Amino acid sequence: MHKLDLIFLDTETTGTGPDSRLCQVAYKFRDQEFDALFKPPVPIEIDAMAVSHITNKMVAEKEPFANSVMHRALAEIFADGNILVAHNAPFDAEMLRRENIEISKMIDTFKLAQYLDVNGDIPRYAMQYLRYYFDLDVSDAPAHNALGDIRVLEKLFDFYFEKMAEKEKDSQKILTEMQIVSARPVLIKKFNFGKYNGQKISDVAIDNRGYLEWLLNEKNKIRDSGGENDENWIYTLEHYLK
């Protein structure tokens, strides 16, 4: 019953830059799956092809997403206040925004994964990694394919919903908490890169505070120059430097 207002969605895109656009969309809403390729207004980058295996030739004769049946359906679904569920939801929401579809409510399983990993035990939070880390039973779900990804996404959502239901039985309250978690930065527990890979950030803050100050400065410079706003790391570094 708690899934009635949820739309599980994934996009494959021409790239990850500011001008990138979607070339595949898959979603599941009220037990129905939808999946389609679209001809984007910009070419698909080679790096993106290497991940999704969608080529420019494959979409050359496809219709644009704008004014498609799927575009109209999604615009109506989100206008009705339904909740986007996605892994790294802000990315998919931004891709839809570039197609004039606005998202007002979202649940980000990427942030839920970090939030519920209280001790920072999980090495990576990529969706396919979590699929196998938790041994989720998902059939017919090839990786880096939008339709396959939403099938994994739904199983991952169910896993975290049940985990949160251990403390809170009210489904609506769980969905509300998921949205709250998804809307704010996540406190990262361990480094997953560099010379401190695998170490707790709280320990590095004691042993080498200067490194955290340097990293925060670098993150802020990138953001302020128009690059990526790595809000989770900025929030985390500011937290441990207080």
Image (cartoon, helix red, strand yellow):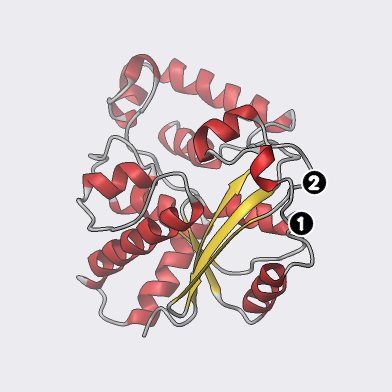
Q: Residue at x 36, y 54 (%)?
A: 141
Helix, strand or loop at mark 1: loop
Q: Earlier in the sequence, mark 1 or mark 2?
A: 2
At x 47% / y 33%, what residue is drawn? 237
- The residue to which callout 1 is attached is 64
Looking at the image, residue 202 sits to the left or right of residue 42; the answer is: left
For the N terminus, the image quarter is: bottom left
- Indicate left or right for 158 with 229 as reference: left
Above or below: residue 132 compared with residue 200: below
Q: Position of residue 78 (x, y in %)?
A: 63, 74
Secondary structure at badge 2 equals loop
From mark 1 to mark 2, how far is it between C-alphas?
A: 8 Å
Q: Amino acid at mark 2?
A: Pro
Q: Can the viewer see residue 60 in this picture?
A: yes
In which quadrant is the C terminus drawn?
top left
The quadrant where residue 208 appears: top left
The residue that mark 2 highlights is: 41
Q: Amino acid at mark 1?
A: Pro
Q: Nearer the viewer, residue 215 or 88?
A: 88
**Pointers 1 and 2 in contact (C-beta within 8 Å):** yes
Q: Is residue 14 visible?
A: no
Q: Is residue 233 above or below residue 135?
A: above
Query: Local crowd at mark 1 within 10 Å, few (<14), some, or many (≥20)?
Result: some
Task: Judge from the rendering whether residue 81 lies leftward or rightward of residue 100; answer left or right.
Answer: left
Horizontal and vertical percent position of residue 82: 56, 77
Q: Quadrant of residue 62?
A: bottom right
